[in-house]
Image (cartoon, rainbow, N blue to C red):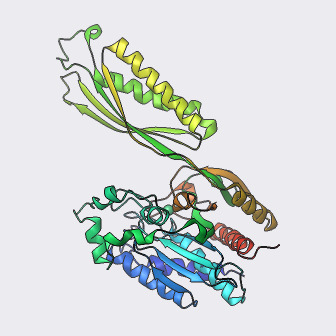
Amino acid sequence: MANIQRLLATLSRINQFGADPQGKGITRLAYSETYTDALADFKELCEAEQMAVRVDAFGNLIARREGKNPHLPVVALGSHMDTVIHGGEYDGTLGVAAALEVIRSLNEERVETVHPIELIAFACEESARFGASTLGSKAMTGLLDTYAVSNLRDKNGITIQEAFRECSLDFHKIGEALRRREEFKVFLELHIEQGPLLEAQRQQIGIVTGIASPTRIQVHVSGKASHSGTTPMNDRQDALAAAAEIILEVESAAKKEAAFGTVGTVGVCMVQPGAMNVIPDSVTLQLEVRGTSEQSKNNVLDSLFRLFRELESQRGVIINPAVINVERPVLLSEEVVAKLTECSESLDLSYIRMTSGAGHDAMSMAHICPTGLIFIPCREGLSHHPDEFAAVEHIEAGLRLLKEAVLAFAIPSS
Ligand SMILES: [Zn+2]
């Protein structure tokens, strides 16, 4: 049996690295000394389980447990060990610690699998240090924009290339981290939900069917600056008043698509000239629309673009939208969803199928192999925060499902 106490001990062991002395959670930023120390310590734990461990050219840790047929594609499982600043103990780290526990219990029970098993701790999943996320899994799956990434810097001005050197990695060799589709049979990731659904619905497990992707747009509204005291109300081209209508439209259009899980947010609003006695003539908004249904996302975007034309004619402003990026939603393998459903039922775990509003390494892996993402509830949906918490019984349910699924894929029944 997988041992929940041993898993919790592994979690605590990893979380000694980066634990804030004043209790403000865990700070284990990608490629930092703290992170590198944690990775080295975890590598020893994997080696103690007789796994062959390597750190690839991007800093991803890959630990392999051999199968009866070493030529077969691997059953891979894992997540990430880097955190945000003052993050929690579970985001990512849980998936890595649980993967090790699965391996330990297989060793203890002397289970020989047909397929080899690989534990992966992906590097730089969080955008906290370099402003870009899931870099390790992107490097592994060929999704990395190498040129854009090579120019990234952290808040202290340290380039990602320098950060690599400090970890004895060579940025010019990152191409070597690329893996082939044929190497993988399946990838499985256990992760806290980072949202409130499972807790609200009192479910132990969320089987993720798709991962939402954002379309990000910058909207510039130009009006006309003039004196706030002398310009009559019906003779204004107020850029901020127009922007306010846009902000509310993002909200109401996304609400109409709530049934599809689509969400819309305006997170940035910059107003010029920014004086109380001047009518604003320039507003820049940055907004995103996220969802797993492209049609639903497009419905929100369409209604926004209709509004832009209306505002131009009604308010005399000029609106220039520029798409910052469009990412396609990732649908996860139906075969893996079906297998996770079957395993949840055989283990008598309560579950729902759901989508993920946040990105994960599983999203990258889904580009090269059938991929499954298992969620467990976290208290009040809170994550990226020192108070992030997952209950032991939920962690145990997730661990049991992860192990059952690994066995199902690594020891095919026919
Ligand atoms: Zn995570």
Q: How far across and down, in percent of the image, does residue 243 sit?
A: 35, 26
Q: How far across and down, in percent of the image, does residue 61 sit?
A: 47, 77
Indicate whether 403 appears above or below 349: below
Q: Nearer the viewer, residue 112 or 207?
A: 112
Q: How many marks?
A: 0
Quadrant of res 65:
bottom right
Say if residue 27 shows up in the picture.
no
Quadrant of res 320:
top left
Say if residue 206 shows up in the picture.
yes
Q: How far across and down, in percent of the image, does residue 20 sit?
A: 37, 72
* Side of 116 relative to 278 (left or right): right
Quadrant of res 21:
bottom left
Quadrant placement of the C terminus: bottom right
* Side of 84 relative to 378 (left or right): left
Indicate whether 287 appears above or below 60: above
Residue at the location (72% across, 58% down)?
335
Q: Nearer the viewer, residue 366 or 391?
A: 366
* Side of 36 relative to 391 (left or right): left
Q: How far across and down, in percent of the image, does residue 259 sit?
A: 64, 36
Residue at the location (48% across, 46% down)?
327
Indicate whether 6 appears above or below 136: below
Quadrant placement of the N terminus: bottom right
Indicate whether 93 appears above or below 202: below
Q: Nearer the viewer, residue 143 or 221?
A: 143
* Side of 115 relative to 313 (left or right): right
